[in-house]
Image: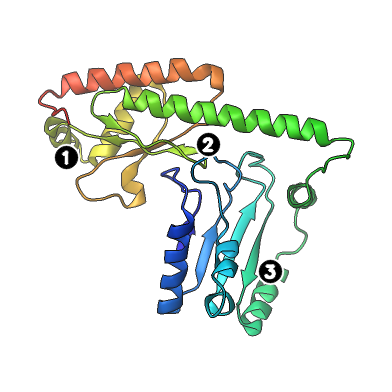
Amino acid sequence: MVIINPGNPTGQCLSEANIKELLQFCYQENLVLLADEVYQQNIYQDERPFISSRKVLFDMGPPLSREVQLVSFHTVSKGYWGECGQRGGYFEMTNLPPKTVDEIYKVASIALSPNVPGQIFMGVMVNPPKPGDISYLKFAAESKAILESLRRRARMMTDGFNSCRNVVCNFTEGAMSSFPQIRLPQRAIEAAKRAGKAPDVFYCLKLLEATGISTVPGSGFGQKEGVFHLRTTILPAEEDFPAIMSSFKKFNESFMEQYEGYSRM
């Protein structure tokens, strides 16, 4: 079983109870849990902090803590570090059989000469500056500024989407994406079918053509049949957000007017 926490594309954070449920299920069904936790520091609310699956597993105690097989992932290429060009990451294996671990090491050893900058970044990520270090104050100030700006951007995007006709968006609790639901009018759905496109793809292409805003149709994520979403990122510069959300709202209003017969819900 694979989980992403904080989530992509939804931007939601799993509670401790959620994770316990998942670990219990994996124990009962003899499943390995792969925990993608690359956005663990990107949290934009205080009610549901990030909790690692490994910590929850160990807190649950035996027999789960000794038997559930868990692989936890982290990387410098994601999160608030955002060093996407620096390919560096790790995974930590818990309770995997020694023979399995040996085989994984064997496969990993084939990848010769990993990039040096990526390894340096990884070293800094897992061992960041500490109080008293010469770079600590600058590191702490820059980290705080980035995360506070991302929190404001998450709020601006959520509020912007929710101010639009037939658009509903949960608050982006973490990670870097928003996943609003677009309640498309029936006439728009029919127009999409005539164009040979999924309704959400049709909407996203119209948005791109009208505004230059690039989004990902929700159909790429296995959304529920008859429900339409798009995924977008909260990463544009904070000062650009008012113009971006204004442009989206203007397009959405025009789209809904064109395909009249929408229902207000």
Asked whether the viewer can see residue 1, the reply is no
Marks 1 and 2, the one that precedes in the sequence: 2
Indicate the quadrant containing the C terminus: top left, top right, bottom left or bottom right: top left
The amino acid type, in three-letter code, at marker 1 is Lys
Query: In this rendering, is residue 2 above or below 47?
Result: below
Question: Circle 2 sits on which residue?
Answer: 44
Marks 3 and 1, the one that precedes in the sequence: 3
For image coordinates 20% across by 41% down, the residue present is: 196
The amino acid type, in three-letter code, at marker 3 is Ala
Query: In this rendering, is residue 92 above or below 141?
Result: below
At mark 1, the secondary structure is helix
Q: Residue furthest bottom?
A: 99
Which sits in the foreground, 233 or 62? 62
Q: Residue 218 appears in which quarter of the rendering?
A: top left
Question: Circle 1 sits on which residue?
Answer: 193
Query: In this rendering, is residue 56 above or below 265?
Result: below
**By what rule are the colours in the image chosen?**
rainbow
* In this picture, residue 118 sits left or right of residue 40: right
For image coordinates 46% across by 53% down, the residue present is: 15
Depth check, mark 3 against mark 1: the one in front is 3
- Residue 257 position, x and y percent, is 18, 19
Do the numbered discs 1 and 2 sit on residues whose CB atoms are within 8 Å?
no
- Residue 25 position, x and y percent, is 41, 71
Q: Which mark is residue 108?
A: 3
Depth check, mark 2 against mark 3: the one in front is 2
